[in-house]
Image: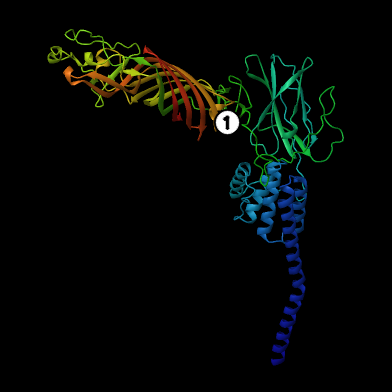
Amino acid sequence: MKIRKALAVALSIGLAIGLFFVCQPALAQNAKVEASAKALQKKAMDEDYLATEFAKAQEKLDKALAACGTDKCSAPVRAQLHRDLGVVMIGGQIDKPKGIGHFVDAIKLDPATALDPDLRTKELDAAFADAKKKAGAGGGGAAAPAGGGGGAGGQPAGDFVHEPTEIQQIRTPIPVYVEYSGEEQLVKVIARYKGFGMTDWKPLELKKMGEKGWGGLLPCTDVQQGTTLYYIQGFNAANDPVAVGGDRNNAYKVKVTRDKVADPPHLPNQPAPTACADTGDCPPNFPGCKKAGPVVGPEQPSGKDGGEFCEEDTECKSKECKSSKCTDFEGGGDHKFRRVWVGLSVGFDYTLVPSADEVCRTNSPDPKGPAPLQPVNSSNYYCVNSNGSDYPVRPISDAERKTEAGSQNDRIVAGTSDKVSGGGAFGNIRIMAALDYALNMNVLLGARLGFVLNTYPGQAAKDDGKSFPPVHLELRGTYLIGKDALMQKLAPFVMIGGGVSTFETAVKVSVVENAYAPATGKIAKDVDAWQLAGPAFVTFGGGARVGVSERAAFMLGARVNLAFGNAFAPSAGPDVGIVYGF
């Protein structure tokens, strides 16, 4: 028994040692295969895919999957390889169905598999979500075989006779030529295309070629490595689509490669187009790409004019497609500019007042006659004391009428005082609310309503009907200088307007009057002479509009006013405010 036990133990130990030496090379070999597969995966995605070398990326991933087989790499590693191969197939526009198949295989191998956040796009997210549903339902179709390239598939049929280009070199225009022999009378044919990396379809209007033909070239800048898709639409005189060749879900496909094409495609009776220069740009919004540099100036709007047939907002200049028709373009690239603008502003007047004599005396030469009615000066000056009361006092009292010296008006000594020498003086302050409507990106029409400060304080001019309430009523037009000026950060402007308002300016004058009792001599005093101009006026000016956003801007300017009516007076001053658009 002891001998048997010893033999059993020895046999077990020997078997364990044998298994160790047999399995150890296999384990080491599997680790080596997995490391090699990961290295191929890294090169495929970090180098080839980001450089749009999709065929090379696919080749490396196929090689890694073939090396891993079904048991030489862990399930998570094989899942990542299938996931990345799906990204290349879909992101490179090689074969979307096969790409989704790889996503399904990845999810089945490792349900925790997720897309690389640095490579995600809307299209990949949608495809991955679709694959999750198929994997959950147990479907998803057969996986793409290792090393499979995936063709572009069959080309669609339609109302046009068309032989699509099968392959074209990168950055080389793709010729599109169709013929139509249907019953409808076509006036326009459009090819809608989407190159690699493009999120929206772009329109290209084909030119009439011969009796039945229409042709054009898809722009070289949109021909990137991968697959370019397009479909055709023909329109009648009513701008209705009456003929088609393919559609968005079943478009013509052109493989785009970096290699030269042996037999370059071309339009009938025309030479093959040549490649445009490599500017270093890459497809828009493509992961890992860097922008070529800043764009100088506002981007010019492109697309269809108002009233033309459309399927998406992006096809229209206005960026708005309603009932299959583009709305009218209002300027400003992708932004609709604000039509209605409200604002608040403040203005200050510096007025040139005329010289005049006897600016305070009124037309009452008889001290015992009726109360004074009007100033004798022709420049509409009215005088007040420092406390704002009328000078000379109104009405004349009975006591003043009976004195030898007469009323205060009659006591003013003529010829030696009561004069304005002319010049400039600070005038009114205007606080105004504004409402403007933009006819386009340069022209605005509007009105301002405001309150006027620093105005004439007396009563005599009001009684005589020679003053105006302290309000400002103005109609005006503003022209902003420059292209799409309403959307710019800085735009010069000029304005012109007119209306009614208070234009009143005070200057100090010295007055000498005889004493109430003549024997006591003369009295000198200072009073304020107010010139009351207007109330009608015209105004013009200019300045700069400083935008702080597409809705708000500061208006920094100056204006000149020409007031006329009761009297004429020119004035000028700053006019600043802020506006807000709706």
The image's colouring method is rainbow
Q: In which quarter of the image is the C terminus?
A: top left
- The residue identified by callout 1 is 334
| x and y, in percent, of residue 269 in the image | 85, 22
| 487 lies left or right of 403 | right
| x and y, in percent, of residue 280 in the image | 74, 41
Residue 77 versus residue 203: which sits nearer the camera?
203
Q: How many marks?
A: 1
> In terms of secondary structure, where does tag 1 sit?
loop
Residue 54 versus residue 509: which sits nearer the camera?
509
Picture quadrant of residue 377: top left
Residue at 48% from the left image edge and 24% from the top image edge: 339
Question: Is residue 69 among the parts visible in the rendering?
Answer: no
| x and y, in percent, of residue 379 in the image | 35, 13
Residue 433 versus residue 11: which sits nearer the camera?
433
Up/down of 152 relative to 238, above or below:
below
Q: Quadrant of the N terminus?
A: bottom right
| 576 lies left or right of 470 | right
**Disc 1 residue type (three-letter):** Asp
Up/down of 64 relative to 428, above or below:
below
| x and y, in percent, of residue 311 in the image | 60, 27
Question: Is residue 175 among the parts visible in the rendering?
Answer: yes
Q: Which residue lies furthest to the right in this view?
A: 262
Q: How crowded is mark 1: few (under 14 residues within 10 Å), some or many (20 or more)?
A: some
Up/down of 203 relative to 83, above or below:
above
Q: Residue furthest bottom?
A: 2
Picture quadrant of residue 352: top left
